[in-house]
């Protein structure tokens, strides 16, 4: 049996034009019965508000917090922390 993620990844998606009026929240609402777990994950990610803070400022702060002297995490974990 395939997982929700397997079904989602195997299902070919329609190409959407860049100027098309596409609403990702509506798409997931329409397809949440089809991909219950993946839809919940998408909901968790999509409800995060978009920040208006300039990326240069965020990376400036991150550099002060996560420098070589004070940080022993892997580069992948640092990237994940900054992105969240």
Image (tube, rainbow, N blue to C red):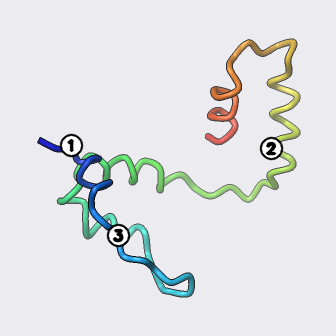
Image quarter of the C terminus? top right
Task: Write the residue at 17% across / 44% down.
Answer: 2
Please name the residue that numbered disc 1 is placed on. Answer: 3
Q: Where residue 43 appears, x then y in whole percent?
A: 39, 53
Among numbered discs 2 and 1, the one appearing first in the sequence: 1
Which of label 2 and label 3 is nearer to you?
Answer: 3
Q: Quadrant of the N terminus?
A: top left
Picture coordinates of residue 48, whole percent (x, y): 53, 51
Identify whether 21 is placed above or below 30.
below
Q: Residue furthest left?
A: 1
Query: Does 8 sit above or below residue 20?
Result: above
- Which comes sooner in the sequence, label 2 or label 3? 3
| Residue marked by disc 3 | 13
Judged left or right of residue 16, residue 63 is: right
Instruction: State the image quarter where residue 27 is shown.
Output: bottom left
**Residue 68 located left or right of residue 32:** right
Q: Residue at x 47, y 56 (%)?
A: 46
Separation of marks 2 and 3 at Cα, in angstroms: 34 Å
Q: Nearer the viewer, residue 81 or 1?
A: 1
Report whether 73 appears left or right of 23: right
Q: Which residue is mark 2?
A: 58
Q: CA distance from mark 2 to mark 1?
A: 37 Å
Residue 80: percent from left, percent from top: 62, 34
């Amino acid at each position: 049996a395939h997982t929700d993620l397997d079904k989602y990844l195997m299902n070919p998606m329609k190409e959407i034009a860049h100027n098309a009026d596409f609403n990702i929240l509506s798409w997931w609402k329409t397809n949440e019965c089809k991909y219950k777990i993946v839809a919940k994950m998408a909901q968790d990610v999509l409800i995060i508000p978009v920040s208006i803070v300039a990326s240069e400022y965020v990376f400036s702060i991150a550099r002060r917090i996560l420098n070589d002297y004070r940080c022993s995490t892997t580069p992948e974990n640092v990237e994940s922390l900054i992105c969240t």
